[in-house]
Image (cartoon, coloured by chain):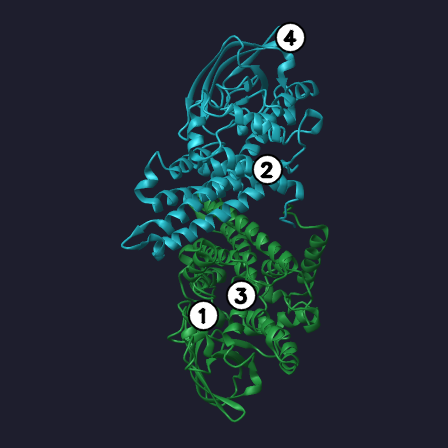
């Protein structure tokens, strides 16, 4: 048992924090939001230079050879500044799909491009009717010649409109909710038949509705085995939960710091409001929840590469519940303790609040995972 | 960073498990499993078995009869002992007076008291709280005046757990009422409970048990050789005592053991025509407790691991988090066990059960004990510094408000 970071991990954390401290003031962030895709291309190149975009990939693919701890450190730092770039969508989600299921040819073609910041990818799995059910896939892939023809629609695809390539799930066999028969495809976002509608999420990050009609995909673009996509999707979602758990911890840290600062400086009745015990205790409870979230994000990093699938899934579900509850408590009370100013668009705390809210509703919310855990009680 | 136990730590855990399996008397284990509070006899029996193995004084250094374990090993020991389930070693003996004497005691005090504390030949109690000094402990009034080579003690302590069993009491007394700061006029005394002038009066708590007491001191003579630390520096000793070994305060093994028991008992109880264990609401509650226990487990590991590294012996501010979250969890798990019993958990028939001979069975013993335990553990968020005081500590020590 050991909670220490290695020297390399400390260096990584420090350099990411330095880069973000230099480039992510609240006003700078606003200017990034105003860019065409709602994030900074220039900063994305700097992430690439620092090695962040190849972080979890093997060195033979131009990567950094890092593991879940490294990803946790980066996500926590990104969460602290509410970074807008498609790190989760590209490096974590599709990166995991490629890393685990990609052929040698696919990996050596795509991973170096991700690592160098030349390609954005999006994970197009969720569908409008599916809510959080990962097996609920209606999009179909029918054989055509040596390849496939895709039809269907994908919903709330993170950075779906900025991506050059999509990892799309489709049914090659079976009925709705059948765990077998789901296949992953690498789809060129510019291919004929792909239509995308882009919109901002409630936290300002971009997502898209994507429709696919008679989209032709070659056999070389099947990702993993035909019909065996679900275990890969499970791993992608687990990686997403682990990464956003760390991101939420970063966001919680920022909200906690802002709230403390506010309690110390805001004067009412002739003294700082932080002298009121009811507010002190609320802040102490926020701290306890933050630490609970931090413990769970650490658990996620430890478990996300666990070989035993049931053990891994069980722990990751606990993480999602624990972090969801912690971040909801911290963010709701951060706004509450700020009072009116916490409700305003011009003040940062509400932006953190909305990021945590979006994170809670990605990859299955608290109730969804708690209910899965309840099913497993023996 | 690695959350898993090392091979050595796992081997250590297996060694403990094997020992508990082979040496914990079956009748004691069964009483603990059914949720009984450990009796004095069961506590003494088990602590002596542990002491023969060299483990009772689990947090003490080797030279004083402890096993010299690392903080991680101590954490594993506490959890395995609670999971067994076995009576916990006397905290007054092992985590309070023992470490205090190791740190502040004279050579004579160490030799006289430590081996007997480890073997629970002396049962210790703690004379800290007074009617006017609860959370505000430094306002205590029990006075000790010098008279020759003795102190003469007058005053009253309250909430003194197991004073009626105790051979000795470690107490905070005021030796200098004129001190500028209240904390500077306090001394730490070891008082023989057989000394003339001591009266112990029971306080029956809401669980119906006699655990708490009032202790009155009326011209009680205590030799000055039984003062620990310097005169008027008792507050330093008390602070050390309260800050020592806080990681055990979460009692996570106990919570785990109670949830395990509740799940087992829920197979025997019914809800809406099915076993209670199949009830979605019950399962959700168990799942939530599972999440909370896992989070606390990791936080506890973080505290212990930091403690393992720092060696300065100072309590981590996070130990206040452990106290609050750990006691909330313990309360929630005992509440769960009670709720499994449903209406059968409401009769107060512990006395009748004990007296049963040929009468038909009244109801499950575990159900009435679960309620007793639920009631008793309302104290968990009050003792050891109320959970509100812990939040005050976090406010000052961590948040700087």
The chain letter under disc 2 is: A
Q: Is residue A36 left or right of residue A113?
A: left
Residue A68, above or below A229 = below
Secondary structure of the residue carrying tag 3 is: helix
Kind of element beneath mark 4 = loop
- Check disc 4 and report the residue beneath it: A146
Closer to viewer: mark 3 or mark 4:
3
Measured as percent of width and height from the top left, residue A308 is found at: 65, 38
Q: Secondary structure at mark 1?
A: helix
Seen in the picture, residue A290 relative to B164 is either above or below; the reply is above
Identify the residue at image location x=36%, y=42%.
A335
Residue annotated with mark 2 = A15
Hey, which quadrant is residue B57 in on the image?
Answer: bottom right
Q: State the separation of the CA atoms marked 1 and 4.
A: 81 Å
Q: Is residue B280 visible?
A: no
The residue wearing badge 3 is: B243
């Amino acid at each position: 048992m050991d909670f220490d970071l290695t020297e390399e991990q400390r260096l990584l954390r420090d350099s990411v924090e330095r880069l973000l401290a230099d480039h992510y003031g609240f006003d700078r962030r606003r200017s990034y939001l105003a860019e065409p895709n709602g994030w900074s291309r220039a900063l994305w190149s700097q992430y690439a230079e620092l090695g962040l975009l190849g972080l979890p990939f093997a060195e033979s693919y131009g990567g950094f050879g890092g593991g879940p701890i490294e990803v946790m450190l980066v996500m926590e730092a990104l969460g602290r500044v509410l970074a807008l770039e498609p790190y989760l969508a590209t490096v974590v989600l599709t990166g995991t799909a490629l890393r685990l299921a990609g052929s040698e040819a696919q990996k050596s073609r795509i991973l170096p491009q991700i690592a160098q910041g030349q390609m954005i990818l999006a994970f197009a799995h969720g569908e409008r009717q599916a809510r959080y059910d990962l097996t609920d896939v209606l999009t179909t892939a029918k054989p055509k010649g040596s390849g496939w023809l895709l039809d269907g629609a994908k919903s709330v695809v993170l950075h779906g409109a900025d991506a050059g390539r999509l990892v799309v799930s489709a049914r090659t066999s079976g009925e709705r909710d059948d765990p077998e028969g789901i296949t992953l495809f690498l789809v060129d976002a510019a291919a004929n038949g792909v239509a995308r509608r882009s919109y901002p999420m409630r936290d300002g990050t971009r997502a898209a509705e994507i429709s696919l009609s008679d989209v032709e995909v070659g056999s070389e673009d099947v990702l993993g085995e035909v019909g065996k996509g679900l275990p890969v999707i499970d791993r992608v979602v687990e990686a997403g939960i682990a990464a956003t758990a760390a991101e939420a911890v970063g966001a919680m840290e920022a909200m906690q710091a802002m709230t403390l600062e506010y309690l110390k400086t805001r004067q009412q009745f002739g003294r700082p409001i932080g002298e009121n015990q009811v507010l002190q205790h609320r802040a102490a409870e926020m701290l306890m929840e933050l630490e609970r979230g931090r413990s769970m994000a650490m658990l996620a990093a430890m478990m996300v590469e666990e070989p035993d699938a049931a053990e891994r899934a069980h722990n990751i579900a606990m993480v999602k519940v624990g972090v969801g509850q912690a971040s909801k408590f911290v963010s709701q009370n951060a706004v509450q303790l700020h009072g009116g100013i916490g409700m305003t668009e011009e003040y940062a705390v509400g932006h953190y609040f909305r990021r945590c809210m979006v994170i809670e509703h990605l990859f299955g919310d608290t109730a969804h995972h708690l209910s899965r855990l309840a099913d497993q009680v023996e | 960073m690695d959350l898993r136990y090392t091979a050595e730590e796992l081997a250590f855990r297996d060694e403990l498990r094997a020992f508990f399996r082979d040496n914990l008397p079956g009748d004691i284990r069964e009483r603990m499993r059914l949720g009984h509070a450990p009796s004095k006899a069961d506590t003494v029996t088990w602590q002596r078995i542990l002491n023969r193995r060299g483990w009772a004084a689990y947090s003490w250094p080797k030279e004083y009869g402890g096993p010299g374990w690392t903080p991680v090993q101590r954490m594993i020991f506490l959890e395995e002992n609670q999971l067994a389930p076995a009576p916990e070693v006397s905290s007054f003996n092992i985590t309070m007076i023992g470490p205090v004497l190791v740190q502040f005691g004279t050579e004579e005090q160490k030799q006289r008291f430590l081996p007997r504390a480890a073997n629970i030949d002396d049962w210790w109690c703690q004379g800290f709280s007074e009617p006017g000094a609860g959370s505000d402990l430094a306002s205590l009034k029990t006075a000790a005046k010098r008279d020759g080579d003795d102190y003469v003690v007058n005053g009253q302590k309250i909430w003194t757990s197991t004073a009626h069993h105790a051979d000795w009491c470690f107490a905070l007394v005021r030796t200098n009422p004129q001190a500028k700061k209240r904390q500077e006029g306090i001394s730490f005394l070891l008082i023989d409970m057989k000394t003339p002038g001591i009266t112990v009066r029971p306080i029956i708590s809401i669980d119906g048990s006699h655990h708490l007491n009032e202790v009155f001191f009326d011209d009680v003579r205590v030799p000055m050789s039984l003062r620990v630390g310097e005169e008027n520096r008792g507050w330093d000793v008390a602070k050390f005592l309260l800050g020592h070994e806080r990681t055990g305060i979460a009692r996570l093994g106990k919570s785990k053991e109670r949830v395990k028991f509740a799940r087992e008992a829920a197979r025997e109880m019914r809800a809406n025509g099915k076993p209670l264990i199949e009830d979605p609401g019950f399962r959700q509650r168990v799942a939530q407790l599972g999440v909370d226990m896992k989070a606390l487990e990791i936080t506890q590991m973080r505290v212990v691991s930091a403690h393992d590294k720092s060696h300065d012996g100072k309590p981590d501010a996070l130990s206040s988090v452990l106290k609050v979250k750990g006691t909330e969890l313990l309360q929630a798990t005992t509440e769960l066990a009670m709720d499994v019993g449903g209406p059968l958990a409401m009769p107060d028939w512990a006395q009748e059960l004990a007296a049963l001979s040929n009468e038909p069975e009244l109801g499950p013993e575990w159900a009435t004990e679960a309620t007793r335990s639920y009631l008793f553990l309302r104290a968990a968020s009050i003792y050891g510094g109320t959970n509100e005081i812990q939040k005050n500590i976090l406010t000052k020590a961590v948040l700087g408000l």
